Amino acid sequence: MDAERWWSTWAPLWDLIEDRHFGTRPTESLIDQIESDVLIIGAGQGLIVRYLAARGYHAVGLDINHSMVRISKEKHNLDMVEGDALHLPFKDQLFNTVVISSGVVDYGADKTAITAFIREAIRVCLRGGKIFIAFYRIPVSIEKIYKKIGVIDLDDVYHMKRIFEINEIAEKNPVRCATPIQKWTGKGMARVYFEWAIVGLTQPREFMAERKWINNIFEAGKEMGLTKQALIDSVPDTLPYRTKSSIEKLLGGIEIDYKEITEFDDCTVVTIDR
């Protein structure tokens, strides 16, 4: 996955995205467990840094992408550091709370790298502190549709680019969506037509909002000189889609002890007591 290309291309639009997975709502739910000083790893444009600062916390953000860090400083004058989560540029036991945002651990399949990310977060966290690890999650109503049409396959692989492809076809002629869906799922065409018709008749509010969000992103990008095709081309073809049970299996396989796993509408959060 060429994450650097994706993040750099979408960086000017990231403020429209970063409240979607481990945003302000899960943060508010965990607020009683968060203590200053706080480190946000994978901070993007600094949404959570800003949110915590407004609540009186001292928070530092770190992101590996130069554009994200630059924009966060220019737009919001945040305490942001450009750096790699594999080698955090901080001393041992410096923060009471460390947050690994979605997009750091959960986009990878390399268990060695995942272990290193988490070990680094533990290293910079004070004894008695907490580490929160966020995994992106798609709202259940949308997840069901994505699994039905092959955006999330039977191996729990999330084919993100397919969202944009199906949206483009649906904008012109929804019936033609059946062809790629049949290709992605391997189902018979009659079944595909039937299931897609059901989706069209019973689209949940969240699914309609998702399509509206996609089109708003393209409109905002156009105003910034970013073409729709450039945005789509930079999106990764596939990402792992981890359920609570697969997260439990992942952490067990790399021998990471944790306190609990909490599911929110837009993310799943692992809590580690230092």
Image (cartoon, rainbow, N blue to C red):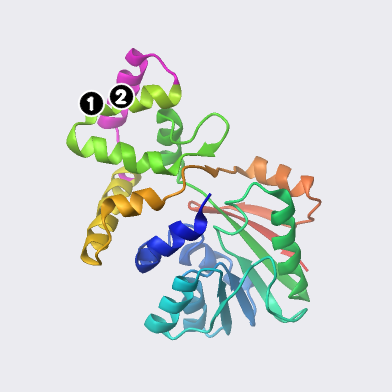
Residue at horizontal 72 percent and vertical 42 percent from the top: 249
| Residue 151 seen in render | yes
- Picture layout, residue 203 above or below residue 120: above
Residue at horizontal 51 percent and vertical 56 percent from the top: 3
Residue at horizontal 35 percent and vertical 27 percent from the top: 180
Q: Name the residue under label 1.
A: 175
The amino acid on which the numbered mark 2 sits, given as a three-letter code, is Ala
Q: Quick one: label 2, few (<14), some, or many (20+) residues within 10 Å?
A: many
Image-based side of 207 in relation to 18, left or right: left
Residue 37 % position (x, y) = 64, 82
Q: Mark 2 points at which residue?
A: 178
Examine the image and state in which quarter residue 157 appears: top right
- Picture layout, residue 238 above or below residue 189: below
Q: Is residue 125 magenta?
A: no
Image-based side of 69 in relation to 195, left or right: right
Residue 234 % position (x, y) = 40, 52
Q: Which of 29 and 167 is in front in this view?
A: 167
Q: Does dot 1 land on a helix, a strand or a loop?
A: helix
Identify the main secondary structure in magenta.
Answer: helix
Examine the image and state in which quarter residue 85 appears: bottom right
- Picture layout, residue 70 above or below residue 251: below
Total numbered labels placed on residues in the image: 2
The amino acid on which the numbered mark 1 sits, given as a three-letter code, is Val
Q: Cβ–Cβ below 8 Å for labels 2 and 1?
A: yes
Q: Does dot 2 land on a helix, a strand or a loop?
A: helix
| Residue 46 seen in render | no
Which stretch is magenta?
186-205
Examine the image and state in which quarter residue 240 appears: top right
